[in-house]
Amino acid sequence: MGVVPNNDGVSASLPDVQPPAVATEATASGTGAQGRRGRRPRSENSAGLAFGLAAYGIWGILPLYFAVLDPAGPLEIVANRIVWSLLFCLLLMTAMRSWRPFLAAMRSGRILGVLTLAAALIAVNWFTYTVAVLSERTVEASLGYFINPLVSVLLGVLLLKERLRPAQWAALGVAFAAVLVLAFGYGNVPWLSLVLALSFGFYGLVKKNVGSKVDAVSSLSVETLVLTPLSIAIMAVLMVQGQATLTDHGAGHFWLMAAGGLITALPLLFFGAAARRLPLSTVGMLQYLAPLLQFITALAVFHEPMPPERWAGFALVWLSLAILTADMVLAYRKAPRPAA
């Protein structure tokens, strides 16, 4: 999950597909309910909040899912996640009779090219995240998603030539100080966190180029389809080498691996439902739930170490996010709305 700044300075939220950017898995350019002025029905807001909590909640507890896949390694887990996600999406499109957007995306050279690049970025993100969890570095993984909104703002400045408000510059400055403190605490630069944040930040930036032209399920279908040949090859090599666990550790392990498709696609659908019902500012604040749950899981369940200098670094990260979020909410409230 992550945030990609719009040209008006208000950020659009993105998840991990996640994140990417979610993911988003809904669309990288925001969603329909965000631009409407006027009060939504309470039932709409309540349903949107429930969907949002479900989406970010699932993303937040993903480390627990990866932990029960032992003894599968990162390559096998990611390869299976890709293949089973594609199968689930194909079944979903068949059930919903929604093949047309997927086929249109496949026929468009521009959209297919953009989604192929997005697929490469999300593969890097998924693999890095899985490595972090399996190597007992979930705290670093959570840090990557905490700083992702800040990375997205920085990418907006460097690549899209967007102008930042003073508060956004302040948030970036505090975040830079946080990275220095954390580098001191870890004894080196937190590379896993930076790779996660950068890969998902660029993922969101790339997905912004297709925006609302591709729906969430079609986008995930194309991305996983592009990655599936390599994933099947990896699974075959692991099987030949006797390192595959998919069929060698009982039915329970097999179905847990297969559940990767559902676990990948379901929160994406929940996010799409939430983003259609909630204001952008609410979605923007909900995104911090996932790394917060990852952080809590790392400390409370995996008992990862958290020395004082790491607490100091994380405190600076949270301060920078508080500045960024407050500025985003103020900008959203001041932004002109189209007439109803």
Image (cartoon, rainbow, N blue to C red):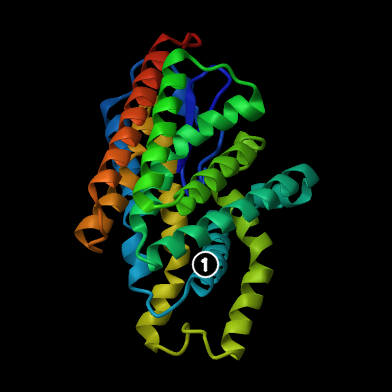
Residue 285 x %, y %: 34, 32
The type of residue carrying mark 1 is Val
**Residue 246 can be seen, yes or no:** yes
Q: Is residue 19 above or below residue 286?
A: below
**Residue 277 can be seen, yes or no:** no
Q: Is residue 259 above or below residue 263?
A: below
Q: Is residue 141 above or below residue 260?
A: above
The quarter of the displayed image where residue 29 is located: top right
The quarter of the displayed image where residue 328 is located: top left
Identify the residue under disc 1: 78
What residue is shown at x 39% (from left), y 68% (from top)?
A: 134
- The one of 216 and 233 positioned closer to us in this rendering: 233
Residue 324 x %, y %: 39, 25
Residue 136 x %, y %: 35, 65
Q: In this rendering, would 229 be left or right of 321?
A: right
Q: In this rendering, would 326 be left or right of 92?
A: left
What residue is shown at x 26% (from left), y 43% (from top)?
A: 311
What residue is shown at x 47% (from left), y 54% (from top)?
A: 192
The residue tagged with tag 1: helix, strand or loop? helix
Q: In this rendering, would 48 be left or right of 20?
A: left
Q: Number of labelled discs?
A: 1
Query: Would you call the spot at circle 1 few (<14 residues within 10 Å), some (14-19), or many (20 or more)?
Result: many
